[in-house]
Image (cartoon, helix red, strand yellow):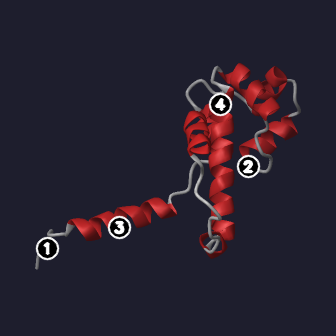
């Protein structure tokens, strides 16, 4: 018996939203690992030497045991031909995801004390 393909827009929308809620952003180490195993393979030793850090530091980054700091983002960007913003954005998204999962329902229980003023809203729009 064939499965029915009719799906209401509402239920599909809820499924997509539920999937998005479970989406985990990539950790900086996962992206760094891709640079190391790509066709132009870079060893952890070579990357460490290029950045002026120890191989242990690079290994901790690759295995997500060390966060990407602004200084490290500058080093990674210079060595790998990327931008520091890439590395900091990856770290920020990963950190926010962990915090959201950790806080869970506690975060939803926080009641806003007031909406942002027009000036605050305009400032928030500028910083994105």
- Dot 3: element: helix
Q: Position of residue 73 (x, y in %)?
A: 74, 31
Res 72 seen here = yes
Residue under pointer 3: 15
Q: Residue at x 73, y 48 (%)?
A: 63
Q: Where, quadrant-wise, is the C terminus in this rendering? A: top right
Residue denoted by label 2: 64
Residue at (63, 71) in percent of width and height:
104
* Residue at figure coordinates x 80%, y 21% from the top left: 50
- Dot 3 or dot 2: first in sequence order is 3
Disc 4 from disc 1: Cα separation:
46 Å
| Dot 4 and dot 3 residues touching (CB under 8 Å) | no
Disc 4 to disc 2, C-alpha distance:
18 Å
Q: Quadrant of residue 43?
A: top right
Identify the residue under disc 4.
85
Question: Whole-Å distance between the Cαs marked 4 and 3?
Answer: 32 Å
Give me the C-alpha separation between circle 3 and circle 1: 17 Å
Q: Tell me, for residue 4, which label it has, or none.
A: 1
- Which circle, 4 or 2, is nearer the viewer? 4
Return the disc, 4 or 3, that comes first in the chain's sequence: 3
Provide the secondary structure element on which disc 4 rests: helix
Query: Does any portion of residue 27 appear in the rendered image?
Result: no
Q: Earlier in the sequence, mark 4 or mark 2?
A: 2
Are discs 4 and 2 less than 8 Å apart at CB? Answer: no
Circle 1 SS class? loop
Residue nearer the viewer, 19 or 121: 121
């Amino acid at each position: 018996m064939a499965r029915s393909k009719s799906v209401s827009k509402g239920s599909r929308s809820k499924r997509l939203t539920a999937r998005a809620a479970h989406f985990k952003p990539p950790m900086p180490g996962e992206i760094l690992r891709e640079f190391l195993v790509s066709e132009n393979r870079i060893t952890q030793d070579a990357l460490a030497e290029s950045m002026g850090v120890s191989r242990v530091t690079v290994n901790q980054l690759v295995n997500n045991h060390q966060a990407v700091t602004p200084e490290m983002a500058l080093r990674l960007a210079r060595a790998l031909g990327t931008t520091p913003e890439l590395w900091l954005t990856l770290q920020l998204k990963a950190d926010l995801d962990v915090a959201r999962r950790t806080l869970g329902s506690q975060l939803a229980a926080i009641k806003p004390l007031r909406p942002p003023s027009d000036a605050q809203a305009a400032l928030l729009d500028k910083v994105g």
